Amino acid sequence: MAKGMGNMLKQAQKLQSQIFKLQEEMADKTVETSVGGGMVRVTANGKQQLVSIKIDPEVVDSDDVQMLEDLIVAGVNDALKKAQDMVSEEMTKLTGGFKVPGLT
């Protein structure tokens, strides 16, 4: 029984190491989304941090700031969702579908 626990502990440590490595790799992977017909493009990384926001000058209208604000919010939310989905997909591959609380 002790041998079985030792093997489980080794497997858990190996998985933890792989998860840590994956989290580091995710910082370098990005997703991009665009809203408003490409007028606002948002890029986020796998750590769910914004990397860039590109705004087409045509959408900048001092008489309609609300539209630009709405496009930015929509773009940011979509990019962060895509980043979360990317990490979740990679984590699922790593854990074989086993849900690890707090990681996906």
Image: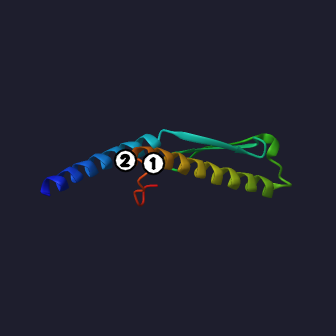
Q: Which residue is mark 1?
A: 92
User: Could you tell whether 87 is left or right of 66 in the image?
Assistant: left
In the picture, the disc for residue 19 is: 2
Name above or below for residue 48 compared with residue 39.
below
User: Could you tell whether 23 is left or right of 61 in the image?
Assistant: left
Single out the residue that lies furthest toward the left.
2
Q: Position of residue 85 (x, y in %)?
A: 55, 49
Which residue lies at the image location 44% right of the left edge and 50% below the top edge?
97
In the picture, the disc for residue 27 is: none
Q: Position of residue 21 (x, y in %)?
A: 36, 42
Q: Amino acid at mark 2?
A: Ile
Q: How is the image coloured?
A: rainbow
Q: How many marks?
A: 2
Whichever of labels 2 and 1 marks the residue nearer the N terminus, that label is 2
Q: Which residue occupies the foreground of this view, 65 or 22?
A: 22
Mark in front: 2 vs 1: 1
Q: Which residue occupies the foreground of this view, 99 or 64?
A: 99
Which residue lies at the image location 58% right of the left edge and 41% below the top edge?
31
Q: Quadrant of the N terminus?
A: bottom left
Q: Amino acid at mark 1?
A: Thr
What SS does tag 1 mark?
A: helix
Q: Position of residue 58 (x, y in %)?
A: 82, 41
Q: Within 10 angstroms of label 1, few (less than 14), some, or many (20 or more) residues?
A: some
- Is residue 49 visible to the viewer in this orientation of the structure? no
Q: Would you say the residues marked 2 and 1 are in contact, meaning their CB atoms lie under 8 Å apart?
A: no
What SS does tag 2 mark?
A: helix
Q: Within 10 angstroms of label 2, few (less than 14), some, or many (20 or more) residues?
A: some
